[in-house]
Amino acid sequence: MEEYLSKLIELLVLYGPKVVGAIVVLIVGYIIIRFVMKGITKLFKKKEYDVSLQSFLRSLINMTLQALLWISVLGMLGIQMTSFIAILGAAGLAIGMALSGTLQNFASGVMILIFRPFKAGDFIEAAGVSGVVSEIQVFNTIMKTGDNKTIIVPNAQLSNTIMKNYSTEPQRRVDWTFGIGYGDDVQKAFDVLNDLITKDSKILKDPAPFMAVSELANSSVNIVVRAWVNAADYWDVFFDMNRKVYETFSKSGLNIPYPQMDVHLHQ
């Protein structure tokens, strides 16, 4: 018994301070991690990050801090962590190479959720598709087309291509090109178009509408018309003006020509 007690005392003298120090570091470390996570949570709420991104980043930061804490504690106990860290690094490299495309989509998704080039509800055009963004996920972005199709686009494609966001600005410019026949009165066409624009309450007065003869084409004299509207009224104004011009030009003696060709026969 005396021999066992002496060995136990030796072990306590040798490892006791290390164990006590490791326990103290572990407790203090968890307290610090708790305060850090509270600060990060407040920061995320202040920046108004996406809820799914907040949850993911909090979990990632929390696991990283805890892993670093446990590595430090085990090192204090005399456990060699060099080999273990090397194995984890090699495994991480192999997994990263195998999931390179997935990780690229993940990184792009995080950047999209942080910098917000678009948000849910925006109408965007990118990666060869267009539609309304219904959901932004970490790996993919889900869009809805005008005919109610669901498009799932990898985030890497959205972050590595030119993107048009039609919902960023509150106002949009509507462009039309109307053709009249050669010989028709251009000023009369201007007057008719001005009258239609003035009567349309959805077309804004400022900036002022613009119109001009844009081209002397093969079969028509083309008039370009540009007007500003609220973004939500864009398509209503666009389609309605086309109908009004078609109905009004014919009543005003203005012809809307179609492509034609003169054929001369020589004997």
Image: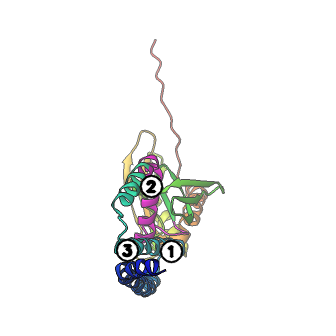
- In the picture provided, is 227 more to the left or to the right than 141? left
Splitting the image into 4 quarters, where does residue 236 fall? bottom right
Residue extending farthest to the top is 267
Of mark 1 and mark 2, the one earlier in the sequence is 1
Colour convention: rainbow
Residue nearer the viewer, 135 or 45: 45
Amino acid carrying mark 3 in the image = Leu
Label 3 to label 1, Cα distance in Å? 41 Å
Compared to residue 90, the image places residue 135 above or below, namely below
User: Which secondary structure lies at badge 1?
Assistant: loop
The percent position of residue 204, horizontal first and vertical second, equals: 47, 75
Quick one: SS at disc 2?
helix
Number of disc labels? 3
Asked whether residue 250 is in view, the answer is: no
User: Is 150 situated above or below 80?
Assistant: above
| Residue at image location 47% in from the left, 18% down from the top | 265
Instruction: Please name the residue that numbered disc 2 is placed on.
Output: 103
Q: Is mark 3 on a helix, strand or loop?
A: loop
Q: Name the residue under label 1.
A: 50
Q: Which mark is residue 77?
A: 3
Instruction: Give the mark nearer the N terminus: 3 vs 2.
Output: 3
Residue type (three-letter) at the residue carrying disc 2: Leu
Q: Give the range drawn in magenta.
A: 95-122
Residue 185 in the image, given as x and y percentages of width and height: 44, 54
From the image, state whether disc 1 or disc 2 is nearer to you.
2
Q: Nearer the viewer, mark 3 or mark 2?
A: 3
Distance (Cα) linking label 3 and label 2: 35 Å
Residue 53 part of the magenta segment: no
Q: Work out whether 265 lies above or below 107.
A: above
Q: Dots 3 and 1: beta carbons under 8 Å?
A: no
Q: Where residue 263 appears, x then y in whole percent?
A: 48, 25
